[in-house]
């Protein structure tokens, strides 16, 4: 067994992506945070210190762009699912 990132199913997120992953974790797990984000996403993202590039990736919902910026794929998936459910675009029954 080797220890290179290329052997991992998901590479370990880089430290620079901590604010982005923190935001995604909040969207996935924290109802109050998610409500704040849905009410005013720009303010919420700025308060977390997200870069303009991170904010653009979140705005677009582009999974590939988010992962390329260091987002963990699981957090991207779960945050998107929770946002869609809160917006009434999907239900957990059809997940």
Image: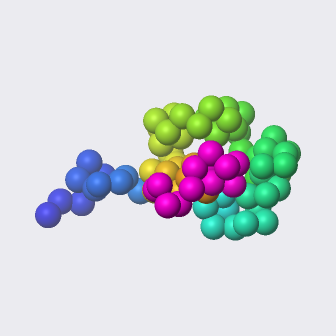
Query: Could you tell me residue 72's position as x and y percent?
Result: 48, 53
The quadrant of the rendering that contains the N terminus is: bottom left
State left or right for residue 68 relative to residue 36.
left
State left or right for residue 23 relative to residue 79.
right
* Residue at x-position 84% and y-position 46%: 40
Identify the image quadrant of residue 57. Answer: top right
Question: As displayed, is residue 69 above or below residue 27?
Answer: above
Query: Could you tell me residue 24's position as x and y percent?
Result: 61, 55
Query: Could you tell me residue 95's position as x and y percent?
Result: 46, 56
* Residue at x-position 72% and y-position 33%: 52
Task: Please say which color scheme the image uses.
Answer: rainbow
Identify the image quadrant of residue 33. Answer: bottom right
Question: As displayed, is residue 69 above or below residue 81?
Answer: above
Q: Is residue 17 visible?
A: no
The one of 32 and 86 positioned closer to us in this rendering? 86
Query: Could you tell me residue 7's position as x and y percent?
Result: 23, 53
Residue at the left extreme of this rendering: 1
Q: Is residue 27 magenta?
A: no
The number of numbered badges drawn on the structure is: 0
Q: Is residue 63 visible?
A: yes
* Residue at x-position 29% and y-position 54%: 9
* Residue at x-position 81% and y-position 41%: 42
The one of 3 and 65 positioned closer to us in this rendering? 65
Residues in magenta, as a range: 83-95
Question: As displayed, is residue 6 above or below residue 26?
Answer: above
Q: Is residue 85 magenta?
A: yes
Residue at the front extreme of this rendering: 93
């Amino acid at each position: 067994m080797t220890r290179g990132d290329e052997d991992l199913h998901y590479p370990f997120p880089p430290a620079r992506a901590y604010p982005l992953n923190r935001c995604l974790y909040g969207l996935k797990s924290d109802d109050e945070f998610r409500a704040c984000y849905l009410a005013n996403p720009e303010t919420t993202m700025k308060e977390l210190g997200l870069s303009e590039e991170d904010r653009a990736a979140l705005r677009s919902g582009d999974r590939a762009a988010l992962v390329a910026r260091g987002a963990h794929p699981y957090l991207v998936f779960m945050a998107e699912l929770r946002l869609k459910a809160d917006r009434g675009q999907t239900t957990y029954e059809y997940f």
